[in-house]
C-alpha cells in the first residue's frame, strides 16, 4: 500500500489589525474677512516708525484690531514690520497699494491684508497671488461688476463721500447684492453709523480716531479712548 504525500496546509490568515487609512490633514483655518474684524478700520499714515507700535497698541486696546497702514510715507513698511512683530493683537494691513511691487513689499513686511484705491488687471493678479485678503477699490457699478465677474466680492468703496456716500451704496445693494464693501474717504464718527446700517457694508475705514494732534503729542490714551468710541458704533441707522 503506497503512502500519500503529506498535505500542505494553507497559511493561517494574518491576525494583525487591518491598516487604517491615513487621516486627512486638517487644512489651516482661513483668514477671517477684514470686513468682519471690527466696525471701523483705522486708516493710518505713519510719519515716524517709532510711533507705530504704541499707536497700534492703543487702537487694539480700544477694540480696533484691523489697522491699515498706508504706503504714503517712507516709514510705512518699517511701521508694518514693527506692528506685525510686536503687537500680537493687531491685524496690520497695507493701504494705498498701487502696484505689484507694493504688494510684494507689503506682504514681505508682514501685512496681513491689502487695500488699494483702485485696481488694474496686473494689480489684481498680484493681490490674488499674495496669499492674504485684499480689498480692491471701486467707485462705480461697472467696476463692481467687473470684479464680481472675476470672483471678487469684498471691495473698498473709495472715495466714499465724494463718490456718492451711503445713498450710492444703498442703491447698489439691489442689483449687486453679493458685493460687500468697506467705504473709506471722508467718513466721520457722525456719518459712519449711516454706512454701517447698510446690509452690504461690513465696516468703514476712517481717520477720525487719529486726530493729528494726538499722535503728534503721543497722546496714546486719547487715541485709545477715541478707538473705543469707534468700536462701539452700532449698526442702526441714525
Image: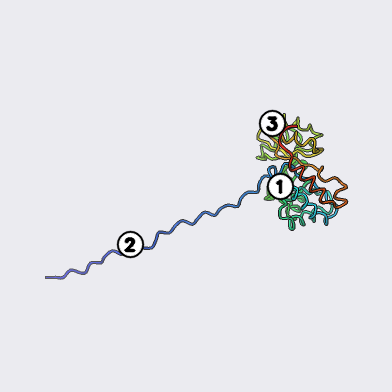
Q: Which mark is residue 141?
A: none
* Residue at mark 3: 173
User: Residue at coordinates 63% horizontally, 49% vertically from top-left?
Assistant: 30
Labels 3, 1: front one: 3
Question: Would residue 108 be visible to someone looking at this image?
Answer: no
The secondary element bearing badge 3 is classed as helix
Q: In which quarter of the image is residue 201?
A: top right
Question: Would residue 19 be visible to someone looking at this image?
Answer: yes
What x and y, as percent, mark residue 96?
A: 79, 46
Label located before the other in sequence (3 or 1):
1
The 10 Å Cα crowd at callout 1, few under 14, some 14 to 19, many 20 or more, is: many
Label tally: 3
Q: How far apart are marks 1 and 2 (CA)?
A: 58 Å
User: Residue at coordinates 85% horizontally, 45% vertically from top-left?
Assistant: 211
What x and y, as percent, mark residue 231?
A: 74, 43
Q: Distance between the residues labelled 3 and 2?
A: 67 Å
Label located before the other in sequence (3 or 2):
2
The residue furthest left is 1
Residue closer to the observer: 196 or 231: 231
Q: How far apart are marks 3 and 1 (CA)?
A: 25 Å
What x and y, as percent, mark residue 223?
A: 81, 48
* Residue at mark 2: 13
What x and y, as percent, mark residue 161?
A: 80, 34
The 10 Å Cα crowd at callout 2, few under 14, some 14 to 19, many 20 or more, is: few
* Marks 3 and 1 close (CB-CB < 8 Å): no
* Residue at mark 1: 127
User: Residue at coordinates 73% horizontally, 41% vertically from top-left?
Assistant: 232
Image quarter (top left, top right, bottom left or bottom right) of the N terminus: bottom left
Labels 1, 2: front one: 2
Amino acid at each position: 500500500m503506497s503512502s500519500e504525500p503529506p498535505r500542505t496546509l494553507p497559511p493561517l490568515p494574518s491576525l494583525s489589525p487591518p491598516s487604517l487609512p491615513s487621516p486627512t490633514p486638517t487644512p489651516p483655518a482661513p483668514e477671517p474677512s477684514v470686513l468682519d474684524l471690527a466696525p471701523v478700520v483705522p486708516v493710518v499714515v505713519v510719519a515716524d516708525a517709532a510711533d507705530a507700535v504704541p499707536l497700534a497698541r492703543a487702537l487694539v486696546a480700544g477694540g480696533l484690531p484691523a489697522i491699515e497702514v498706508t504706503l504714503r510715507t517712507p516709514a510705512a513698511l518699517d511701521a508694518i514690520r514693527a506692528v506685525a512683530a510686536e503687537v500680537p493683537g493687531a491685524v496690520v494691513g497695507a493701504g494705498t497699494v498701487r502696484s505689484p511691487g507694493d504688494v510684494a513689499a507689503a506682504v514681505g513686511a508682514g501685512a496681513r491684508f491689502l487695500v488699494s484705491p483702485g485696481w488694474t488687471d496686473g494689480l489684481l493678479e498680484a493681490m490674488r497671488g499674495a496669499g492674504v485678503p485684499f480689498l480692491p477699490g471701486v467707485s462705480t457699478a461697472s467696476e463692481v461688476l467687473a470684479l464680481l465677474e472675476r470672483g471678487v466680492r469684498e471691495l473698498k468703496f473709495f472715495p466714499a463721500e465724494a463718490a456718492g456716500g451711503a445713498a450710492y451704496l444703498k442703491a447698489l445693494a439691489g442689483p449687486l447684492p453679493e458685493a460687500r464693501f468697506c467705504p473709506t474717504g471722508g467718513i466721520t464718527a457722525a456719518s459712519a453709523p449711516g454706512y454701517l446700517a447698510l446690509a452690504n457694508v461690513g465696516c468703514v475705514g476712517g481717520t477720525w480716531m487719529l486726530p493729528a494732534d494726538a499722535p503728534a503729542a503721543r497722546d496714546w490714551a486719547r487715541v485709545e479712548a477715541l478707538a473705543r468710541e469707534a468700536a462701539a458704533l452700532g449698526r442702526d441707522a441714525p
